[in-house]
Image: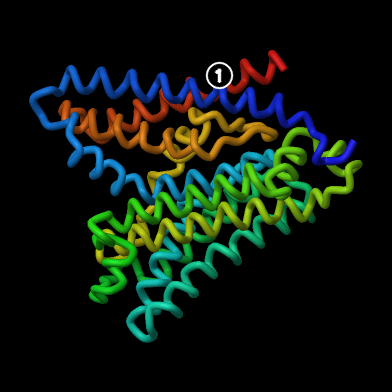
Amino acid sequence: MSVNQLPMQQLKLLAVKREFFIYYIFLAVMLIFAVALHDTGFFSLTNFMNIVRQTAPITVMAVGLTFALAVGHIDLSIGSVVALSALVGALLLQHVGIPLAVLGALSVGLIVGLINGLLIERLQVSSLLITLGTMGVITGLSRQLTNLESVPIIDQTFTAFFGAGELFGIPSLFIWTLVIAALGYVALTKLAFGKHLLAVGGSPKAALAMGIKVTQVRIYALVISSMAAALAGLLYAGRLHGARYTLGEADLLTVIAAVAIGGTSLFGGRACIIGAILGSWLMGMINNGLILSGFSTNEQMIARGAILIVAVAIGVKELKNG
């Protein structure tokens, strides 16, 4: 059986089923907060656009992580890549133009993704352990690079393009979200590469028998995940007018929860870009609602952890059911 004859219909049906799940959750949470916070402006276009702006880096990271999870890998280093890429971009911007600064920042993602992929495949070690190690290395590099100091960005073109700017009245962060989401959706659902990802994540042995270059596909997936995190770092730097080693530090749990609750399996073989986007918006909406309700940062963290546990429990249950 060729890869193009994979049971895609069955995979699509499962994806649709999980997409409905995230739709229901999304609508339910929106209605609950809309009723509970009716006098705070929660249910307004302005507030929803704020949520989209604030979650743009999370959404970009979620799209990238979907590729890594699709092949059965986890990438714990994405949060640290956000900080290092933002710092590298901000430092380069003080000496060179925007194109070279952006290229330098994205190169961080490319290099880290390649290192992660090569180490995992060559050493045959769990992606969890390898990316946990690279996360520590990169976090140390970020702190060493600037001696725990923030790096301001005063280039208004950069901050407009990656942060607070607009194009025809549409916020640039929303445009970045749509562009990355469209690229991710096309790559995963319309290209042979997407089928290869799901085949490798579903059964590496079967994928190898079909002639798919399993090792290469896995490395590509980790590179995409890491480069998406690097782009997220640029979005953070643009929105905040600067970079700091703590950027992305608290995002890992949110991103994993967003992707998992959006229908992507944490064990490989099933991925949903639309679900990942809705998942990230859902997490943003919950954060927004909790803030407006007066919950503390710690309580918000508890809520995100609880959501991740529920998402993982659902994934494990579906895995056992086949």
Residue name at image x 38 percent, y 78 percent: 98
Kind of residue indicated by mark 1: Ile
Residue name at image x 58 percent, y 32 percent: 264
Going by the image, does 96 lie left or right of 73? left
Going by the image, does 158 lie left or right of 36? right
Give above or below for 208 relative to 158. Answer: above
| Residue carrying label 1 | 314
Spot the residue most to the front.
168
Residue name at image x 46 percent, y 33 percent: 257
Residue name at image x 18 percent, y 17 percent: 35
Q: How many marks?
A: 1
Spot the residue most to the top.
321
Q: x, y percentage for residue 168? A: 26, 60
Nearest to the observer: residue 299 or residue 189: 189
Spot the residue most to the left.
39
Q: x, y percentage for residue 134? A: 58, 56
| Quarter the C terminus occupies | top right
Nearest to the observer: residue 186 or residue 140: 186
Q: Secondary structure at mark 1?
A: helix
Give above or below for 220 relative to 104. Answer: above
Going by the image, does 195 lie left or right of 211? left
Nearest to the observer: residue 151 or residue 174: 174
| Quarter the N terminus occupies | top right
Residue 281 visible within the image: yes
Residue 128 visible within the image: no
Residue 317, quarter of picture: top right
Q: x, y percentage for residue 179? A: 45, 54
Give above or below for 317 relative to 6. Answer: above
